[in-house]
Amino acid sequence: MRGVRWRRVASQVGRSVAVWAVSTVTMLVLAGILPDFRLRSENGDSATDIAVTAAFGAGAFGLLSAVVWPLLVRLLLLVPALVLGLLVFFLNGALLLLALHLNPAERGAAAPETAVVVAAVMSAVASATGAALAVRDDDAYRRRLYRLSDRRRRSGPPAPAGPGTVFVQLDGVGHDTLLDAVGKGLMPTVARWLDIGDGGRPTHRLTAWRTDWSSQTGASQLGILHGSNHDVPAFRWYEKDTREVVVCNRPTSAAELQRRAVGYAGHGGLLTVDGASRGNLFSGGAEQQALVLSIAARRRTRENRSRAGYFAYFSDPANAVRTALSFFAEVGREIGQSTRARLRKQRPRVSRGGLYPLVRAFATVVERDVVVAAVTGDMLVGRTAVFADLVAYDEVAHHSGPASRDAQKVLERLDRSLALIENVAEHAPRPYRIVVLSDHGQSPGETFRSRYGLTLGDLVRAGCGMPVSRKAERTRSGAEARAAVRAALRFPVAEGGDQHRPEPGSEPIVLASGNLGLVSFPDVTHRMSKEEIDARHPALLPTLANHPGIGFLLVRSDRHGGVVLGAHGAEIPLADLDDEPGPLAPFGPGAADAIRRTHAFPHTADIMVNSIHDPADGEVLAFEEQIGSHGGLGGAQGRPFLLSPLGVSAPVDRGEELVGAEHVHRILRRWLRESNGPQVPLEATEEERAA
């Protein structure tokens, strides 16, 4: 036993010396390249003196990074995650200047801006060297993983008995998209779990489920985490009683939707006992939260400052430098890919300029790295239930297409994240079950505007007899990654292009949620009926229903309660509505039930508009500027997946269909009970109701 211990010590010392040596050489090389960085005195020194100076500087910098850096990060816990990521370079540079100043011979010096560059390069080289040397050392690997956990592992209580559960949401990855990626070898971890082409034994089962009419993260994740998505008709909608536009990725709206869901469900959420929520729109009732949008609008306190979300990650400067370098590389990759698509005149195509390269890089690099690090930290301290959302694929698929090469590369990286989480589970203080799921899929297709030269708003104005601009304006995209950016920045502003409180008037408010459109008349305080709309604007409903880009409409009817309208005068009362034949035939099974459920919501719009869907190629027409979209009925957007371990009960019985996010919530609750996990309270606490 003593011999093993000494071998471990010798191995650790050997790695430390090797990293020190490589860092010393790196410092010497940089001193020879950079004009404002020197390792000799003004009178000149021998090569030996210069080497000693470099060795001293490299050693002092490494020691300061290990000791001082975590303390600096703790002092900056209230700084938003994205801002802290940018501060990494300047703080690292300051540590290097301090390390050079500690040299008693005072030979080294560097300009401040040069110190930032030198520190970044040295941190990256030291991290890569240490990782390469430790790659085959299980003990070293375990120590690297444990550095990702926060201080609670030492001071907190021991992990509860029984297995914990990690829920990883791959935002926007549909069931068929996952199978296609596995078949192409893009996701070997998932393939191994399912035993596809591996020849081993499967550890997981794959189940498809069907979303509600509103096939988007706001509705799905609210139902999954809180057990109710009642009265969430779309991604954005106008509420006549409050005269506000609700947008699922606006912090104030997310907080209100969570409050309502707690009231409808009667409990705090899936994660109320020893849970953690990472990168989500909603908290799920978790005590530990990081990059959660519903708390971004609240005043920051000790409880909601997202401490565990990024302290553990940024406490290692090498992590921060690596993420920052990957961020800028991803920005360059997006600019190159979008330029290539434009030069090739690729169709369909949407604009990918402005801030989008930065948003994409945040979603595919920063959000992924911080969330995965937070999850690994949760596992290493033994938390019972963790739910994390990775939005990378969804963001790229919106702009590049669900089956594009750009999106497929993202799936490869997400699979590596799953592999890392699986590896961490082997070193956690309790066994973990890893459940992977998605909230919706994505349906391809060009935009309504690009095909017809006008937006849905233009078409509504034309049907109302109002003037229409000859140049159609773009409709802003509501991609979920912008919510993650907003949560990281604590920036509670409305989505660009959405009026938070529109001025009341007779002009209709037209909002888009993928290929689902909503039309509301703000000067009428109740939900208008078909008869009232026809009396005011006789041409509006026929104009919409007969347009070749629109599949069907839903309106309230004084005579029938509710009707679905289609082309050529089709008018079907909800009581007689069936999936086929008629306007709903292309949309597949379950469409009629989804429409009836939405019709019963208090805040359903005066006119609900769903675009056409071509079952042959799965395409829809988005009313937003997206060539991969979700939000309504039609195609892969309504068919996400649930990948569950064989150690838990089957989600549904053979022959039974899994329908709706609320049904998924009940299954996840059952699995937690089977694992002797937390029992979701029957009623919410006063604090949860007030949240």
Image (cartoon, rainbow, N blue to C red):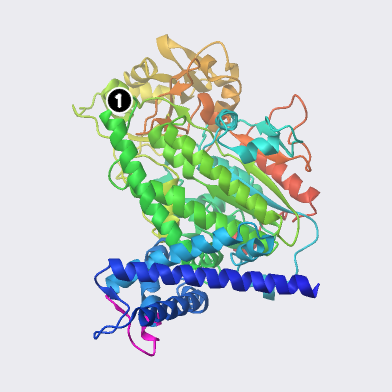
Inspect the image, locate mark 1, and give the three-letter code of the amino acid beneath it.
Ser
Q: Residue at x 54, y 18 (%)?
A: 573
Q: Residue at x 27, y 75 (%)?
A: 111
Q: Is residue 417 above or below residue 62?
A: above
> For this view, does 364 lie left or right of residue 183?
left
The residue nearer to you, when weighing 116 against 237, is 116
Q: Nearer the viewer, residue 672 or 167?
A: 167
- Residue sitting farthest toward the left: 470
Q: Is residue 190 above or below residue 269?
A: above
Of 190 and 185, which appears nearest the observer? 185
Task: Answer yes or no: is residue 617 visible.
Answer: yes
Residue shown at the point (41%, 51%) measured from the top left: 362
Residue bounds of the magenta highlight: 99-111
Q: Where does the image place residue 20, in percent across and percent down from the top left?
A: 49, 72
Residue 666 placement (x, y as % from top left): 70, 42
Q: Is residue 102 magenta?
A: yes
Q: Relative to 128, is 153 above or below? A: below
In the image, residue 495 lies in the stretch drawn in magenta: no
Binning the other alpha carbons within 10 Å of mark 1 as few (below 14), some (14 to 19) or many (20 upward) gives some
What residue sits right under mark 1 in the picture? 450
* Residue 359 visible at all: no
Q: What is the residue that sits farthest to the bottom in this orientation?
A: 104
* Image spot of residue 382 (x, y percent): 70, 62
